[in-house]
Amino acid sequence: MAAYHFVGTPTPDFWGTDSARELPDVAPTLHPVSGYGWLGVEAFFLISGFVICMSCWGRSPAQFAVSRLGRLFPVYWAVVLLIVAAGVVATLTGQRWGAPTDLRTTLGNLTMIPSALGVPFTAGVAWTLWVEARFYLLMGGLLLVGLTYRRIVAFGFLWLTLAAMGRELDSAVLDAVLLSEYAGLFAAGIAVYLMYRYGPNLMLWLLLGFAWCYALTVLNDRVVAHPGTSWAVSAAVLTGCLCLLLLSGPGPLRSLRWRPLVYAGALTYPFYLVHQSLGVPVTRGIIESVTGIGLLPSIALGLTLCLLLAALLERFVDRKLGRRFRHHLTSALQVDERSCAAHELSVAGGAPEAPAARGEGRGRAELVEAGGAR
């Protein structure tokens, strides 16, 4: 995605009208190759099907919700506030800033569902999080019923069938609920996870084949929206991503645990959020203010700064605040009626009577009454 936004954008003069800044001239090979970087979103949804199915397994709906909220929101909130703060500073100093920074838009973005509320995205790439959130809701509904092997296989086939019906009916409601454009990618990831957990079998290969045929067929809609790319190349690249997932899931690479690779995976989410809405304006500033530095070195410097910011967000927000956030959410889910009654009495200034003592007193009174009656 970063390669697409920085080098592969279909706008030749994205970084300026000077010939030294036009991407086809500066990067004649890298520019057309990076033009397929938008497929990173599709790969992200494919991997998400695998990871979210794994995250659901063996958990209650509440535990699943806590894990997702704690993983996504702290870093997301920090990035939104950083973008708004940088935008305010840029506006005050007369610099150009593309992201909206008004209060109403900011409040809408803090919910992570701004498009549903009718406001633009502060972080341009955050539209994918709304797609992810709806996938979480579908998986959460399955958790409420009870997650079993047979149920999730049936869910995969049923989901793809209903999503196809939604496309045929041209139903905006069904498309929004069933994610008809990306259902094949999520379902394929689920199928690969089931292979990882239970081993490959004919039913899972059928589910994966159905999902992949679906995904590659509807991929053409996305290809049309990205001029200069072809369906055949896009399908081949995405199929390569599926093969890598198969190798690293149920395949021979499943036991690979390389620490730098794990850390790189931890950086992907914060880097993804900052690379466009913060990285592109910073790179523009470098290009316009630093003379004698070429376009590609400026882009490399901008991406390096994005990586450093992502590392800071991972260390101080995701790792520390995120952990506390998840802890407090878990504690909040453990509140019961007994602790609520004790809290109400303490607020009222009274001393709560032990429930066991109250129960014991009632039991003795009932025995005395029964003895008197006899």
Image: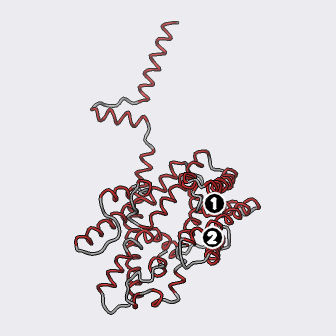
Q: Which of marks 2 and 1 is in front?
A: 1
Q: Give the numbered dot on residue 125.
A: none
Q: In this view, does 24 lie to the left or right of 188?
A: left
Classed neighbour count for the residue bearing mark 1: other residues with Cα under 10 Å, few (<14), some (14–19), many (≥20)? many
Classed neighbour count for the residue bearing mark 2: other residues with Cα under 10 Å, few (<14), some (14–19), many (≥20)? many
Q: Give the numbered dot on residue 187.
A: 1
User: Gap between marks 2 and 1, in whole Å?
Assistant: 13 Å
Kind of residue sitting beneath label 2: Leu
SS for dot 1: helix
Q: Between residues 184 and 143, which one lies in front from this camera angle?
A: 184
Residue at 48% x, 56% y is 68
Tally of numbered tags = 2
Please determine whether, in this image, residue 292 is positioned above or below residue 159. Answer: below
Q: Do the residues labelled 2 and 1 touch (CB within 8 Å)?
A: no
Q: Between residues 368 and 186, which one lies in front from this camera angle?
A: 186
Q: In this view of the protein, can residue 139 be seen by the observer?
A: no
Q: In this view of the protein, can residue 346 be seen by the observer?
A: yes
Please determine whether, in this image, residue 21 is positioned above or below residue 147. Answer: below
- Residue 112 in picture, x, y percent from top left: 42, 57
Residue at 66% x, 70% y is 246
Q: Give the numbered dot on residue 245.
A: 2
Q: In which quarter of the image is residue 42?
A: bottom right
Kind of residue sitting beneath label 1: Ala
Chain-order first, disc 2 or disc 1: 1
Q: In this view, does 370 lie to the left or right of 78?
A: right
Please determine whether, in this image, residue 196 is positioned above or below residue 138. Answer: below
Q: Residue furthest left?
A: 92
- Residue 2 in picture, x, y percent from top left: 47, 76
